[in-house]
Amino acid sequence: MSPDYATFFDAHTHIHFPAYDQDREEVFARAKLASVKMITVGTQESTSRGAVEFAKAHLGDVWATVGFHPAHFSFNWHHDKGEQSHPAAEQLDIEKLKNLAQESEVVAIGECGLDYFRVNDDESKKRQREGFVKQLELAAAVKKPLMVHCRAAFDDLIATLKSEVRCLKSETPAVIHFFTGSIDDAKKLLDLGFAFTFGGVITFARDYDEVIKMIPLDRILSETDAPYVAPAPYRGKRNEPAYVVEVIKKLAEIKNVSLETMTEQVWTNAQMIFKI
């Protein structure tokens, strides 16, 4: 592939997480060798700060997001040693996120959203929705796009977005990462201006083929969500940004376009959405 169009893009990774503390720069070097640029995504104030710091150390190759993951609002939150260095649960401090969001390396607000997969109590769901609205408002205030997480909560997510549609300004598009919803969900989110990222799961499961075929090329991005969900042929291993190339290959196959076309389109989409 010619260097003229060989910019692969990982729209959602977590290379700054503790999961990479022993070999982070080696992981980054492999990504750079594979011509992969990336956005490393914050999940609470501490990891958001870490994302910004890593982006500052790798200008032109890495950008950051700042946000508060919906799982951290739940009463059954647990410490993931691969994500957080410290076991104490954080509380959403929107002013701290707003201060971080002013950094030029920050290209989106998130990951934020709703996740009911392991949540049964109404209070946790309520806290998630309230926290999501605060981050919707933050994105509108700083004029940066959203990086949205949604799992088992698409009806509430779409209802919340419609009720806060004033926050979804045309100049600040929104992205839903690791999309797992239905074709109907995707159509509603397309109408709201969303783009969609797809990751390693599409390389070994066929559940997403039809929705990928339906979504226009100019609304599709590739991601790894590293260190999670490595694509084939690396399934079962720790994921890393260099592996996004396998995702783009599969997207090209599903969309019936060349690898060159898919690679160029994803990079063009990323530049448009994130202003990079």
Image (cartoon, rainbow, N blue to C red):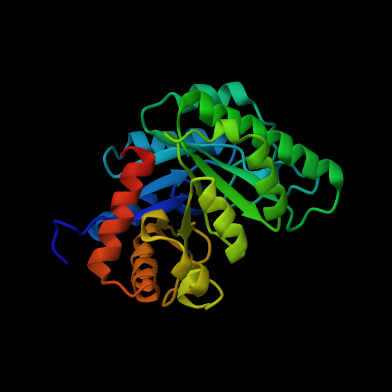
Q: Residue at x 72, y 41 (%)?
A: 128
Q: Is residue 175 above or below residue 134?
A: below
Q: Is residue 105 visible?
A: yes
Q: From the viewer's perspective, tell me whether residue 165 is left or right of residue 1.
A: right
On the image, the x and y values in percent for residue 51 come to 45, 39
Task: Classify residue 187 by image quadrant.
Answer: bottom right
Q: Residue at x 47, y 62 (%)?
A: 198
Q: Residue at x 35, y 66 (%)?
A: 248
Residue that sits furthest to the front in the current view = 191
On the image, the x and y values in percent for residue 54 come to 39, 39
On the image, the x and y values in percent for residue 229 come to 52, 66
Q: Nearer the viewer, residue 70 or 16?
A: 70
Task: Classify residue 182 by image quadrant.
Answer: bottom right
Q: From the viewer's perspective, tell me whether residue 141 is left or right of residue 118.
A: left
Q: Is residue 135 above or below residue 198?
A: above
On the image, the x and y values in percent for residue 154 come to 67, 54
Q: Nearer the viewer, residue 272 or 60?
A: 272
Q: Is residue 230 visible?
A: no
Q: Is residue 118 above or below residue 159?
A: below
Q: Quadrant of the N terminus?
A: bottom left
Q: Nearer the viewer, residue 134 or 72?
A: 134
